[in-house]
Each structure stands twice: as C-alpha cells, then as structure tokens.
Amino acid sequence: MKRVTPNHIVVPRRTPRRFYGHGIPGVDLDKLAGRLIVVEGADGSGRSTQIAMLVEWLEGSGHATVQVGLKRSTLVSEELEKAQEGNILSRTTLSLFYATDFADQLENIILPALKAGFIVLADRYIYTLMARDMVRGMDEAWLRNLYGIALEPDAVFYLNVPPEELVQRGFAKNAALDYWESGMDLGLSRDMFDSFMKYQDAMQQTFRKLQATYGFTIVDGMRSIEAINADLRKKISAVLAGH
C-alpha cells in the first residue's frame, strides 16, 4: 500500500457515508476519509484500460490509490479460479464464493485504505455480482441482503458497450469466448456465440434495472479511449472536490 504523499488533500464529503444494508459492525463511517470509485462494465468494455489511466492521473496529482476487483481476495481467489475451471459450480455456490471474495477485500483492503485517506478504484463491485446472479434467476431481495455489507461508493461508472461490439473485442483479444461470460451454464443455446449474445443482452437489461435502484452513471463506452477518460476525469474531479 502506497504512502499518502505530502500534497494529498482530502475534501470532506457533502453527504454522510452509509452501508447499503446491515454493514460491518464496529466501523466508524465518519473516519473513512478517502474515496471509493467504481468502474463497472462487461469484459471488453475497457474497464482495465480506464482504471490504469485514472491511477496514473490520480497519482500524478498527488493522490494515493489502491485497486480492488473481482477474484482478488487472498482468502478465496485461487480456490474460486480453480472451481470455475471445471464449469461445475451451482449458481448458489458461485454466488457465495464471489460474496466471500468481496467481503474479504472490503474488510481488509477497502475500509482500511479509505480510513487512511486513499482513493480506492474498484474494477467492478457488487453490481456485477448481483446482475450475474439475477440473470441466473436468484432472488433480488436475497442478494440485496447478502450485499448489505457493502459500502456505498462515492461514484459508480458503468461503461456501456453493446454485445455486438463486446464479442468482436473478445475474439480480437483472446480468439475465443469465455464459458461463464457467455452464460453457457444457463443453457441459452448450444452455440457459444449465440449464448454470449443472449447472455450479454440480459446482463445489460439487468444493469439498467440496477441503475434505477442504485443510481450509478452510465457512460458511453463506444467513444475513443481518450474521450471516455476525459469524461471520467471530469466526473471524478467533481467527486474529489466534494460536489
């Protein structure tokens, strides 16, 4: 974890922090001086590229940053990766694996970093996890309770890229489609390409539903990398200024 640089200035939040639900006991929300910025989007939407550029910009401006994301917990990430390779996990088991991964990072990375005044950049958050589970037929109320431990971010940006573009980017990068990102476990189609299109369309519809509930910002991901980054910088600058 990087040391906060001397010119690091934390501007007080205009609204009090809160958990989405029951939260984590013993956490003093008033002492979480940092900022939590989330970038959401499907694989191929450009999340990783944008986060790397944001880190360079923020640290160049004197802000200390920490990055988190899916399957990065030291507690279960390796086990989750191995379990997914067999493509045999039930939807509930997969959901609880990811929830454990998230909870571990929240308690041991996100909250301590925010307390130290860092800017935490999350490469996806609970919204992707909830959307995946909802598409697989899991109860939304159960999921809201499961992720009631989650801290409400200071800003959430969803990079919106249509399935037609995502599939092209996926082939260009990996020359293949991912089993889980194609929703092959759902039996949507025996053809992986067709399943991918149906699954990603369902994911986008679910994200629009979640956006109405959680109020995150939908960003046009079909623009140039530079244009998207300039847009994100402008919005994040407003968050850091306390607006």
Image (spheres, rainbow, N blue to C red):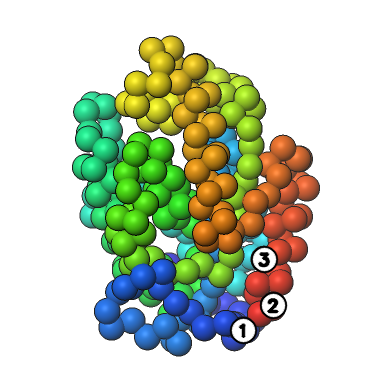
Whole-percent x, y for residue 236 in the image:
67, 66
Judged from the image, the secondary structure of the residue bearing numbered disc 2 is loop
Residue position for label 3 = 236
Whole-percent x, y for residue 197 in the image:
53, 24
Q: In the picture, residue 166 is in which quadrant?
A: top right
Q: Nearer the viewer, mark 3 or mark 1?
A: 1
Amino acid residing under circle 3: Ile
Residue position for label 2 = 243
- Left or right: 1 as drawn, with respect to 97: right
Amino acid residing under circle 2: His
- Left or right: 37 as drawn, with respect to 57: left
Residue at x 57% of width, y 47% of height: 208
Residue at x 26% of width, y 27% of height: 87
Mark 3 surroundings within 10 Å by alpha-carbon count, few (fewer than 14), some (14 through 19), many (20 or more): many
Image mark for residue 14: 1
Callouts 1 and 2 close, C-beta under 8 Å: yes
Residue at x 65% of width, y 72% of height: 239
